[in-house]
Image: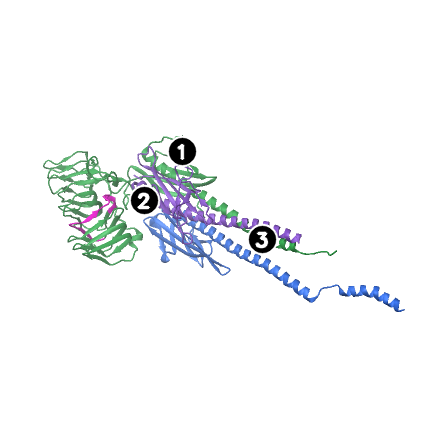
Chain colours: A purple, B green, C blue
């Protein structure tokens, strides 16, 4: 009887530990998948910006927020672009920054964001540094060709 | 005493061994996948940092302000800057030469991507209000003024009026440019070597008069992805409304008549592949084409291009968003833009081997380049200085005074080439 | 005599009977086999589910890695080509371009992504397989922007896995 109880307790503990490992592995894979997809979206957005009329870049892309590509038919996150003229460049050089943030299946949020009252994911500067931070971030510059 | 025997523990060990094996296998694949994913992010970030370095090199070559850059030898400059999650180091070799080379290395967490760009000086196709290859005599009506503005700063008027309403020709004859009817050119006038400028009545030129213009007009090159399209036949809107959304189109002819209105919604490239003697593009009888804000219309025409009355309304008010290229190669074949005074022409026309005429009731903003130009408008012409930005129009010009990328390549090609 | 025999029976025969009584009854064996089968079935079930899960995930990871590598390699090369040297044929399934003086092309052969190029001084195409399990490949070009669409697919344990990926890139050379 004692042995049975001991074994059941042992089984439970080891089982829970294994499940944790499995869940962690699946989360790792999900993160990797979503990171690749988000990076692809951000990369394509920068290519669009590079292909745009220089004079329209700041007006069009600064503080622009768009949905990331759907994963299994669901929008899981958002991408934000920032464009600003470099000080002292006489409006001939623009700094570009694009970040992607999203919410994973288990509720974990990559980047900075939150769930609003309607249950949708929205970007939110949680650390108050004035910008949206995310591991998926691309920064570059564009100059005006004359 | 009875000895109790059982194998519950063995059972537990067997099940847990199985789960541990599977867990280890899964773990061993997930960790490298996560690592590879992060390295991919680092590599992509490094690429865009390297691009930033190239862009900054282009900017500083044109501005001439090397603040923040260090000398490297007598002919080279170098700069290192932090940006985002990493940094970039860009070196410009032979910075004062005709073809400086910029090499930019972007680095993020030890991952580097390198880009090399050879620069060259290049210019725009539209460097003057009117540019021709034959004698220019005009304008037909009194008191026409040729001046300039910059559409990137807004509409013409107020402080946005300049003195770059240049008229140039490669003709080298006497009277290669003859101004009549009290016309005023607020800008420079230039003929071919040995040519002269004649100012009749009280016509005047506020800028320089020179005879050193030897600009060549390259023939129009129809983009391959446009010419290879299957033809959509004749587009004919005889009243009513139509819309063309972003995309490439190929027609045998494009005609809008009898109050018909075609709206351009997005970037539309159109190739009207007709016979040279046929009408490629026509707006007549109160027909109109309207370019919506955010839109752009680029037309390549193999035949006659005739616009009248309400014409083409460019509601972006940026001439670079209306580009007309004629491949006609014969004298006295026409690209005619007309109006009824209600709609100005805000665009550019490039017809290097044929004639262009503006008719009475039309105010012109932009630039016209043609073999021969007949400026028969009552209204003045305003050259858009923003057209000097290289790449603002489809066809590129010849050597100019500003640097741009001539050849771009990423070092360390992923696959072999030789 | 009778007493001796009784005693003998009492002592020697009891041990023999006891010996004769050691062993398992048929019912006990059947019960044990049933219990053992149930245990092994449960272990096998766990193993089977885990194995299928592992196969699917491994396949997904492999496909995703291939998709990333293929897209990255193609992007890095195509980006260097001028628009005038790009030719898209076979309904968008093949792209021909050049990097400097070297002609290069990408297309699919039996769900394998193939890259071919002509080395300097040669006239024959040299082929290299860059990836497998590529169900579709599509290129399009508009206004100096090339869009590449790929889809990698595989069937594992009767389940279809599909990894689509699309990217756009601006051509950097005139």
Q: Residues within 10 Å of mark 1 (few under 14, many from 20)?
A: many
Would you say B31 lies left or right of B218 here? right
Horizontal and vertical percent position of residue B173: 16, 40
- What is the number of the mark on residue B19? 3
**Chain ID, mark 2:** A
| Residue at mark 3: chain | B
Mark 3 crowd level (few <14, some 14–19, many ≥20, 10 Å Cα): many
Between disc 2 and disc 1, the foreground one is 2
**What kind of element bears circle 1?**
strand
Q: Identify whether B289 is placed above or below B138.
A: below
**What chain letter is assigned to the residue under label 1?**
B
| In the rendered image, the vertical position of residue B60 relative to residue C54, given as above or below | above
Circle 2 residue:
A52
Q: Is residue C139 above or below residue B369?
A: below
On the rendered structure, is A6 left or right of B74? right
Is C95 included in the stretch rendered in magenta?
no
Viewer-nearest residue: C127 or A141: A141
Could you tell me how far apart the alpha carbons at marks 3 and 2 are, in whole angstroms?
Answer: 54 Å
Locate residue B192, reporting x and y percent: 20, 39
Q: Is residue C16 left or right of residue B143?
A: right
Considering every residue shown, the one lying at the far left of the view is: B201
Q: Are marks 3 and 1 on the same chain?
A: yes
Quadrant in which residue B142 is drawn: top left
A27 and B156: which one is in front? A27
Q: Is residue B306 magenta?
A: yes
Which residue occupies the extreme bottom position in the image?
C2
Sequence-wise, the earlier of marks 3 and 1 is 3
Residue A134 seen by the camera: yes
- Find disc 1 in the rendering and name its residue: B79
Residues drawn in magenta: B302-322
Residue A30 in picture, x, y percent from top left: 47, 49
Q: Which mark is residue B138?
A: none
């Amino acid at each position: 009887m004692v042995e049975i109880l001991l074994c059941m307790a042992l089984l439970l503990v080891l089982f829970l530990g294994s499940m944790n490992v499995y869940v962690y592995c699946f989360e790792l894979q999900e993160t990797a998948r979503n990171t690749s997809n988000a990076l692809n979206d951000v990369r394509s957005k920068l290519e669009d910006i590079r292909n745009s009329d220089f004079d329209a870049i700041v007006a069009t892309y600064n503080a622009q927020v768009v949905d990331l590509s759907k994963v299994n038919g669901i929008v899981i996150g958002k991408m934000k672009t920032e464009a600003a003229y470099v000080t002292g460049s006489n409006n001939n050089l623009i700094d570009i920054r694009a970040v992607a943030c999203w919410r994973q299946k288990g509720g974990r949020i990559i980047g900075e964001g939150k769930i609003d009252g309607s249950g949708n994911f929205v970007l939110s500067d949680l650390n108050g540094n004035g910008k949206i931070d995310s591991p998926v971030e691309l920064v570059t510059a564009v100059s005006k060709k004359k | 005493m009875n000895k109790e025997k059982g194998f519950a523990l063995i059972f537990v060990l067997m099940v847990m061994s199985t789960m541990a094996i599977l867990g280890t296998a899964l773990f061993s694949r997930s960790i490298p996948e996560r690592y590879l994913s992060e390295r991919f992010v680092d590599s992509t970030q490094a690429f865009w940092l390297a691009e930033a370095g190239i862009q900054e090199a282009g900017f500083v070559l044109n501005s001439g302000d090397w603040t923040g850059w260090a000398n490297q030898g007598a002919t080279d400059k170098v700069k290192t800057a932090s940006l985002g999650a990493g940094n970039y180091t860009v070196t410009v070799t032979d910075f004062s030469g005709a073809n400086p080379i910029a090499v930019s290395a972007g680095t993020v967490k030890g991952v580097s991507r390198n880009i090399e760009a050879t620069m060259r000086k290049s210019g725009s196709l539209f460097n003057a209000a009117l540019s021709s290859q034959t004698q220019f005599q005009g304008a037909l009506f009194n008191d026409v003024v040729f001046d300039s503005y910059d559409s990137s700063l807004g509409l013409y008027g107020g402080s946005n009026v300049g003195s770059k309403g240049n008229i140039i020709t490669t003709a080298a004859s006497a009277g290669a440019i003859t101004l009549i009817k009290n016309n005023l050119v607020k800008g420079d006038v230039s003929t071919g070597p040995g040519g002269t400028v004649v100012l009749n009545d009280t016509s005047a030129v506020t800028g320089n008069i020179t005879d050193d213009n030897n600009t060549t007009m390259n023939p129009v090159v129809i983009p391959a992805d446009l010419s290879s399209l299957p033809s959509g036949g004749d587009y004919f809107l005889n009243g009513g409304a139509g819309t063309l959304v972003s995309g490439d189109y190929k027609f045998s002819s494009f005609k809008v008549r009898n109050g018909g209105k075609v709206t351009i919604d997005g970037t539309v490239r159109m190739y009207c592949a007709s016979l040279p003697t046929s009408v490629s593009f026509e707006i007549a009888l109160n027909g109109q084409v309207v370019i919506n804000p955010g839109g752009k219309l680029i037309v390549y025409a193999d035949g006659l291009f005739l616009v009248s009355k309400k014409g083409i309304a460019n509601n972006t008010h940026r001439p670079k968003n209306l580009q007309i290229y004629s491949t006609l190669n014969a004298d006295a074949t026409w690209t005619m833009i007309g109006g009824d005074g209600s709609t100005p022409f805000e665009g550019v026309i490039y017809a290097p081997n044929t004639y262009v005429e503006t008719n009475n009731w039309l105010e012109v903003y932009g630039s016209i380049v043609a073999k021969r130009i007949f400026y028969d408008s009552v209204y003045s012409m305003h050259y858009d200085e923003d057209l000097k930005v290289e790449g603002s129009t489809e066809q590129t010009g010849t050597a100019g005074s500003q640097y741009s990328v001539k050849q771009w390549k990423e070092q360390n090609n992923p696959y072999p080439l030789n | 005599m009778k007493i001796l025999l009784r005693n003998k029976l009492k002592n020697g025969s009891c041990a023999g009977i006891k010996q004769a009584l050691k062993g398992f009854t048929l019912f006990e064996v059947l019960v044990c086999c049933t219990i053992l089968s149930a245990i092994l079935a449960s272990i096998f079930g766990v193993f089977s589910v885990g194995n299928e899960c592992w196969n699917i995930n491994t396949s997904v990871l492999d496909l995703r890695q291939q998709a990333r590598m293929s897209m990255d390699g193609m992007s890095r090369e195509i980006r260097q080509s001028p628009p005038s040297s790009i030719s898209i044929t076979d309904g968008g399934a093949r792209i021909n371009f050049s990097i400097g003086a070297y002609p290069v092309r990408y297309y699919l052969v039996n769900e394998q992504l193939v890259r071919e190029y002509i080395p300097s001084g040669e006239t024959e195409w040299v082929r290299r397989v860059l990836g497998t399990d590529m169900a579709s490949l599509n290129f399009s070009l508009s206004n100096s922007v090339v869009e590449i669409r790929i889809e990698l697919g595989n069937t594992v344990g009767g389940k279809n896995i599909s990894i689509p990926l699309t990217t756009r890139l601006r051509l950097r050379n005139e």
